[in-house]
Amino acid sequence: MELLRQIVVFIHLIGFAVLFGAWVAQAFGGQRRFTRLMDVGLAIAGLAGLALAAPWGISWEPGMSFYLKVTVKLVVLIVIGALLGIGSARQRKGGNVAPALFWSVGVLALLNAGFGLFWR
Ligand code: HEM
């Protein structure tokens, strides 16, 4: 079970890498547009995250802090999804993503990674 959880954490990290990597490519040298790859990364990180939100394959008893972290991460994920949705709709109509929207996605993705690593 412990190994299976590690594999799911690995998949979770791949989701983060795809989302953040796609965003960095657009932020630095790209056209600062939202891409399909960002949706894919968010979906992978989200699905694996939901699986990790249940306390299986761990030897410690999860307390309030664990569930609070998971809830905050879920809220951040929903906000990122909403921002990607709004920006993508604007792009389909031929417009550009507002800079505040574009930069928020990168910052929020990093924020969730930070919660995952430092909120223990
Ligand atoms: C944009 C979305 C997300 C990103 C970028 C992200 C990123 C990360 C990263 C980098 C880690 C650290 C892995 C490690 O321990 O080395 C992590 C851990 C974790 N994440 Fe996420 N995450 C996201 C969404 C979520 C969501 C939506 C949930 C739950 C509903 C979640 C639940 C967890 C849990 C429970 C851990 C701890 C895993 C463990 O140590 O057993 N994550 N996340």
Image (spheres, rainbow, N blue to C red):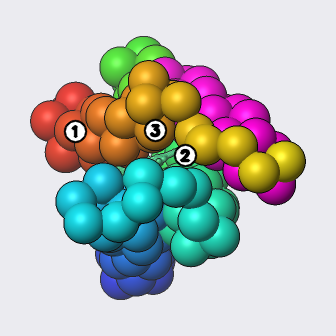
Pick whichever, 85 or 51, lies toward us.
Answer: 85
The alpha-carbon separation of the residues under discs 3 and 1 comes to 19 Å
Which numbered dot is residue 53? 2
Q: Secondary structure at mark 2?
A: helix
Residue 62 place in picture, x, y as percent:
39, 34
Three-letter amino acid code of the residue under disc 3: Phe
| Residue at figure coordinates x 56%, y 73% from the top left | 37
The verdict on label 2 being within 8 Å of ligand 1 is: yes
Residue 57 place in picture, x, y as percent:
43, 65
Counting residues from the N terminus, which is met first, the one under dot 3 or under dot 1? Answer: 3
Pick whichever, 5 or 116, lies toward us.
Answer: 116
Pick whichever, 29 or 71, lies toward us.
Answer: 29
In this rendering, the label closer to the viewer, 3 or 1: 3
Q: Residues within 10 Å of mark 2 (few under 14, many from 20)?
A: some
Q: Which residues are magenta?
A: 70-92
Q: Dividing the picture into quarters, in which one does residue 95 lie?
A: top right
Which numbered dot is residue 102? 3
* Picture quarter with the C terminus: top left
Which numbered dot is residue 114? 1
Counting residues from the N terminus, which is met first, the one under dot 2 or under dot 1? Answer: 2
